Amino acid sequence: MNISPSTGLTGLAALALALTAACAPTDSAGSDGASSSSAVATATSLADCKPADLPLLKSGTFTIATDDPAFEPWFVDNDPTTGKGFESAVAYAVADKLGFAKDDVTWVKAGFNQAVQAGTKSFDVDINQFSITKDRAKAVDFSSPYYSAAQAIITLKDSKFAGATSLAELKDAKLGAQVATTSLEAIKQIAPTSDPLVYDDTTKAAQALQNGQVDAVVADLPSAYYLTAAELDGATIVGQFQPTTGESEQFGLLLAKDSKLTPCVSLAVDALADDGTLKALQEEWLNQATDVPELK
């Protein structure tokens, strides 16, 4: 708590001020919520989640992080402030549910691997296709899921694997994926005859495909659309599949571990699911998913 009694107040007045301060909006308590109200920490309704009561990194500002660059279809033109792209739109919808105007939102950059590590955060929430996993949840908090993603196989059109119609037909392919992702975990479903190659991010995995270092890349389906449309020459999506190994691929907003803001952010996401906003945003920004064959 950063508020202290002013010099010259009587003891009674000082006590009253202290009690008032205990219920006042936070100043810069941080998302670990040292001075957040108990109502927010145990919120069961958005009525308990007013901006003035939230344990924000910076009072009056909802600080949201994402990676740099921020890819389509999650963001447009590497600019998360536009509200365009699925995750930018979801972020502003969450902010709106919590009572923040668009001008009250501040964006910062945070690398994927750094964000999923334990420790203090430079943001209130981070939205960056974070799959909700039990291992990650030991180090950070996640909101309710705002998206459930299928996995996709990307290869070059002239590859002998381009015509595969089942996961079994891909077992002899040299596969690649981003480190620490459920895409990498999902490769086990293919039972490949060689260990997959691991890359720092999906773009580098795609470059490896372009350079012939791997036969195919596994990535979530919306990222696969972007990579084949904008990052790769002569690439195609072989098909999609739902992960059955490891944990299901659901994306959540990431917060610091034990953040007192988490219940309110989850309530906002739940409300967006209930009123159809998430579905509408998915159809607007990710609607290409229905065109890809399913691999079994």
Image: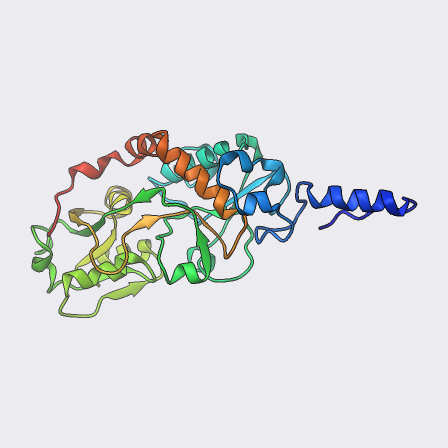
Q: Position of residue 296 (x, y in %)?
A: 10, 52
The quadrant holding residue 60 is top right
Q: Where is residue 42 in the image (x, y as percent from the top left)?
A: 53, 46
In the displayed orientation, state which residue is furthest to the bottom.
194
The quadrant holding residue 285 is top left
Q: Residue at x 33, y 62 (%)?
A: 179
Q: Position of residue 124 (x, y in %)?
A: 53, 47
- Judge left or right: residue 219 versus residue 106: left
Q: In this view, does 48 lie above or below 246?
A: above
Q: Nearer the viewer, residue 191 or 83?
A: 191
Q: Which residue is drawn at 17% across and 64% down?
A: 174
- Judge left or right: residue 97 versus residue 61: left
Q: In this view, does 156 lie above or below 184?
A: above
Q: Which of 122 and 136 is in front in this view?
A: 136
How many numbered marks have been drawn onto this rendered protein structure? 0
Q: Is residue 56 visible?
A: no
Q: In this view, does 207 lie above or below 42?
A: below
Q: Where is residue 247 in the image (x, y as percent from the top left)?
A: 28, 57
Q: Which of 99 and 289 is in front in this view?
A: 99
Q: Residue at x 45, y 37 (%)?
A: 268
Q: How is the image coloured?
A: rainbow
In the displayed orientation, state which residue is furthest to the right.
8
Q: Is residue 153 visible?
A: yes
Q: In this view, does 142 lie above or below 292?
A: below
In the displayed orientation, state which residue is furthest to the front.
12
Q: Which residue is drawn at 44% across and 43% down?
A: 266
